[in-house]
Image (cartoon, grey):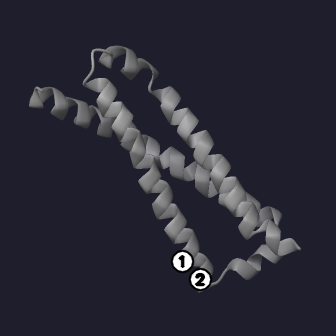
Amino acid sequence: MDTTNLRESVTDAIRFWEPRRLVYNAVLAATVLIYFALSYPASKAQLTLDGAQGVFILAVLANVAYCAAYVPDIFAQISGYRELWQRYRWILFVIGVLFAGIITRFVAMGMFVGSNR
């Protein structure tokens, strides 16, 4: 394997994925804030140190999961399909954001909507 090709692929992957991490985190944060607001004032009971630590851990885990996109991206880039992949990898981003958003929605509902009961 040509190390120059691998280096270019990793650099390109970072250049593509890292700016989009801001969008990813914004979507997940907006989801949590929406469910917090929809369940207010009952959701206010979740504003504790334990609750904040739990949200922090989930945010870190969501960002670790975001890094999973690097594996197929770099693999596809070092293949013969590099140009095709670079044109359509935004689809992986959209699917990943939707998937993470759905998971975040269910977690936020459990944290905040459940406090309305």
Residue 44: where, in percent of width, then height? 75, 78
Question: Which residue lies at the image location 62% right of the left edge and 40% below the top edge?
Answer: 98
Q: Which residue is mark 2?
A: 50
- For label 2, the crowd category at 10 Å Cα-Cα, with few meaning under 14, some 14 to 19 and many 20 or more, is few
Q: Amino acid at mark 1?
A: Gln
What residue is rendered at 67% in x and 48% in y?
Answer: 102
Say which of 31 and 63 sits in front. 63
Residue at the front extreme, as displayed = 1
Give the structural element (helix, strand or loop) at label 2. Answer: helix
Do the numbered discs 1 and 2 sit on residues whose CB atoms are within 8 Å? yes
Q: Residue placed at 62% from the left, 78% from the top?
A: 51
* Residue bearing the label numbered 1: 53
Residue 69, by quadrant, is top left
CA gap, disc 1 and disc 2: 5 Å
Determine which quarter of the picture holds residue 37: bottom right
Question: Which residue is drawn at the image coordinates 70% and 78% (left, top)?
Answer: 46
Number of dots carrying numbers: 2
Decide: is 112 above or below 72: below
Amino acid type, label 2: Asp
Towards the viewer: 81 or 89 = 81
Residue 72 as seen in the image, left or right of residue 29: left
From the image, which quarter does the N terminus lie in? top left
Can the viewer see residue 60 in this picture? yes
Could you say where residue 42 lies in the image, as x and y percent from the top left?
82, 76
The image shows residue 55 at horizontal and vertical percentages of 57, 69
82 relative position to 116: left or right = left
The quarter of the rendered structure image containing the C terminus is bottom right
Asked if 105 appears above or below 42 in the picture, the reply is above
